[in-house]
Image: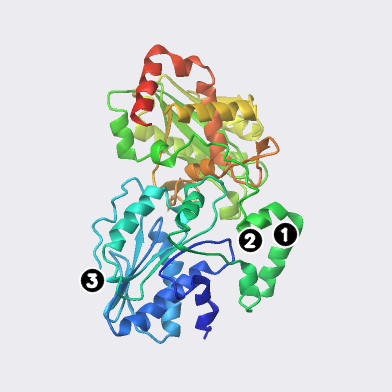
Amino acid sequence: MRVLENYLPLFDPKEHNIIANTPRASAKSTSLAQMSAHLVVHTCKRSPHDIVVFRANANSLEGSVMQEIEDWLDAFGADYTPHKGPMRLEVGACNIYFLGVSGHDRSRVRGFKPKNKLIAIIGDECQQISAEENLKHALSTFRRYLDTAAPYKVLLCGNPHEVKGHWWNTYVQKMTGRYTKVHCTWRDLAKNGLLNGDIIEDIKLEKEVNPALYRFMYEGDITDLAGGAYPSFRRERHLVSPDEAIEMTHGERIEAILWGGDGAIMNDATGIAPLAVMSSGRAFVLERFFYDPKKHGRTLAPSELAELIQLYLDDMEKKYNIIRDGVISSAFAIDCAAADLITQLRYTIPDYHAVLSFTGKNVIRNNSVINNCFARNMLYIIDYGGYKDYLTGKFVPCEDPLAEQLESVVWKNNALDPAIPNDLSDALTYGACFYYENPENLYLPERKKYYEDQRRSNP
């Protein structure tokens, strides 16, 4: 059995409130799993208490932290029973709850009530939570049930985010006085024999061939990170639920749908981001098409890819009545580098969809257009909780990948850093610039009045 003391020092057992913004291969998840199992098996034996473990999405806990906690419970020889709705492990008279705290309903955990008082509140992968407000609401609810007379723990764990100004990076700095800040790296594990040789060699190779990425990924150093390429995008303002989008567009009609597309080059992903341009001049990004050959282990030929896109179009046409409702125009703006895909789409999909080659690839200018759209509240992204994989026909629940890319892409040498995925953010750029690059689309009198009103109501 693994030695308990090998992991617990990462979280300083003497402290109650701990925050760890540490890089990869630093054993955060293993440590908090061990801490949870240890508390319910030993500390709670005398007085039953509960634990809550949270992430952005609850379904991501089941195959990760929950499994690790079960492994540690097995190692401690404890009996436990898993339950669904809410997801929890029952360990004798104690419970370990697993909850998701992201989403537009920031009070979603307000109804949570444990069976016993809490002895630990544990946040994992906190950088994936959609906004600081979600974390604050969750902690406010959980702390109401915290037994401060017991040796309680509040652990907030996460990885530094790629965007230097991301809320999690700044939150860690703000909370350093309230929480004990713990920092550890792969070296702390390696010196205790807790990393195998292959992983150590991979880390050393990364340090040699890509020092900047190494410092960020394995040292947690964010000082070299450039600013985000889309600073005007605010998840809490511009990422909306389907219900919120319906409410926001009440009384409006769709004038056009513009399908920005970034075709795969070699092993890149293919992304399509359709913009529904409303009569107010605002645009809402509808369900995205996304195919990543790395996830499937298969690069599709343009003809195969076009067939999947046709299936995607069939779904979109049925849902939005594109033809029946007389949408003024439906046009694809595809990256000119994907010439084979452009040709194949012109052959495959109905000719009432214009398929155009996007050639105006001035990165600085196009980026400025997108940031202006977000700054003036003229562009919103609808969060569907994931995307449909048209190769398998299954829905993939996940954090919105377009929003994640907008928050992750950074500048490097006066260009977008090619090491950070940007398939969907580029697709959005091509579609949005196709329309908004014309200044009149932002400044027509009625539309100017609209976004100025919005700016006053959203300071």
Q: Residues within 10 Å of mark 3 (few under 14, many from 20)?
A: few
Q: Name the residue type under label 1.
A: Lys
Closer-to-camera residue (342/214): 214
Tell me if residue 147 comes above or below residue 1 in the rendering: above
Q: Residues within 10 Å of mark 1 (few under 14, many from 20)?
A: some
Kindly identify the residue that appears in the image at 41 percent across and 55 percent down. Answer: 56
Closer-to-camera residue (6/277): 6
For marks 2 and 1, give the CA distance: 9 Å
Which mark is first along the chain, 1 or 2?
1
Could you tell me if the residues under marks 3 and 2 are in contact, i.e. CB atoms within 8 Å? no
Q: Position of residue 94 (x, y in %)?
A: 29, 77
User: Visible in this render: residue 44?
Assistant: yes
Looking at the rendered structure, which numbered label has been put on residue 207?
A: 1
Q: Which residue is mark 2?
A: 218
Tell me if residue 235 comes above or below residue 77 in the rendering: above
Which mark is first along the chain, 2 or 3?
3
Left/right of residue 146 with respect to residue 295 in the rendered view? left
Q: Position of residue 199 (x, y in %)?
A: 66, 69
Q: Position of residue 348 (x, y in %)?
A: 54, 32
Residue 97: quadrant of the picture: bottom left
Q: How many marks?
A: 3
Could you tell me if the residues under marks 2 and 1 are in contact, i.e. CB atoms within 8 Å? yes
Closer-to-camera residue (321/230): 230
Which mark is first along the chain, 1 or 3?
3
Q: Which residue is mark 3?
A: 115
In terms of secondary structure, where does tag 1 sit? Answer: helix
Left/right of residue 358 with respect to residue 209 in the rendered view? left
Residue 198: quadrant of the picture: bottom right
Q: Name the residue type under label 3.
A: Lys
Please identify the residue farthest to the front as the structure is shown: 177
Please identify the residue farthest to the top as the structure is shown: 445
